[in-house]
Image (cartoon, helix red, strand yellow):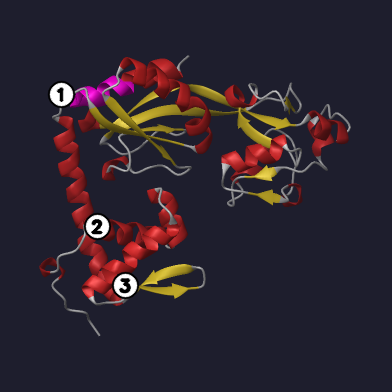
Amino acid sequence: MQICMDWRSVKFDWNKARAFLVTAEEGSLSAAARALGMAQPTLGRQVDGLEQELGVVLFERVGRGLTLTPSGMELLEHVRGMGEAAGRVSLVALGQSQALEGPISISASETYAAVLLPPIVTKLRKLEPGIHVEIVVSNHASDLLRREADIAIRNFRPTEPDLIAKKIGMADAILYATPDYVAKLGNPKTPYDLRHADFINLDRSGGMLKGLNSLGLGLTEANFPLLTESYLVMWELVKQGAAIGVLDAQIGDAEPTVVRVLPDLEPLQFPIWLVAHRELTTSRRIRRVYDFLIEELKR
C-alpha cells in the first residue's frame, strides 16, 4: 500500500529530523550516535519524539540494526533535501562573515583530538580569545557539506569538488608494545619472529591485516585476538602490555612506557590533510583557524 502523506504540512523539530536522517543513513542508533557525537539514549528519544509528532512508525528493528518502514522511506527523501538545503544556507551565511570572534568546529580522530589538538587549540585561544572552539571527535570522516564540522583533519584526500584541502605531510605508523611484551616474544629481530605475536585490530574489514602483511609480517586472523574501533582504547591496551598496536610515530614515540617493535621495519605511511568547505574560505574566522592549523600541524 502506498503511503500518501503531505510531509510539508507537518511541523517538526529539525534536530529530531536530523537524528532520523543520520539514523537512517547509518543503519543503527549506535552508529548514528557516534556520527553525531551524542549519547545513544538521547538520539533514541529524538527519533521517538519525531515518530510521536508525526503519528507514524519510521523504523523496524532487524537484529541489531534498523530498517525503514514505508513511511520512513517516504519521509527520508524530504528530510534529506531539507538537510542539503540547510547546509547550503548555513555555508553561504558563514562564508560571508568577516567577524573574527565566534564558534568554530574542528573534526579529528580520537588520537589526534586527544594528543595533537589540545596544545594547538590552547595556543590558538591565547592568540584569539574571541574564537570558541568545538573539537568533534570522530574516527569516521565528518560530513563537512552538512556542517558536522567546519574544518577536518583527515588521512585521505577528499574527492568532493566543494571541498578544499591542504596536504600537511606524511605520517609514519609504527608497531608499539611494552618492553615486557617485547621480551616475552624473545626480543624479535625479523618480521618472521612476530608470527606468534598478538595484535590489536582496529578494522573489521581486514584492512589492517592486509597493511601489516604488506610489510612482510605474514600474519593471519589468529594474530588479532583483540578488536576495538577506538584508538584510545587500543593505545591503553598496548600500554598495559596486552598486545602490539599501531600508531602515529609522533604520538607513539612520546610515550615512555612503550617501545618500537622491530625499529628497523619500514613504517606504514599515510597522508595528513586539512579539509574545509570551499565557501568557508571567505570567512575571516575560518581562514584564520585553517591557516593556523596548517602552520602548527607542520611543526
Mark 2 Cα-neighbour bin, 10 Å: few <14, some 14–19, many ≥20: some
Mark sitting earlier along the chain (3/1):
3
In the image, taking residue 192 as reference, residue 89 lies left or right, namely left
Residue at 68% in and 25% down: 266
Q: Which residue is mark 3?
A: 58
Q: Which residue is mark 2?
A: 80
Mark 3 Cα-neighbour bin, 10 Å: few <14, some 14–19, many ≥20: many
Q: Specify the quadrant of the image occupied by residue 217.
A: top right
Residue at 47% in and 67% down: 65
Numbered badge on residue 62: none
Which kind of residue does numbered mark 3 sit on? Answer: Leu
Q: Residue 242: image x %, image y %?
A: 75, 42
Q: Looking at the image, can residue 203 be seen?
A: yes
Viewer-side residue, 102 vs 288? 102
Mark sitting earlier along the chain (2/1):
2
Q: Main secondary structure of the magenta part?
A: helix
SS for tag 3? Answer: loop
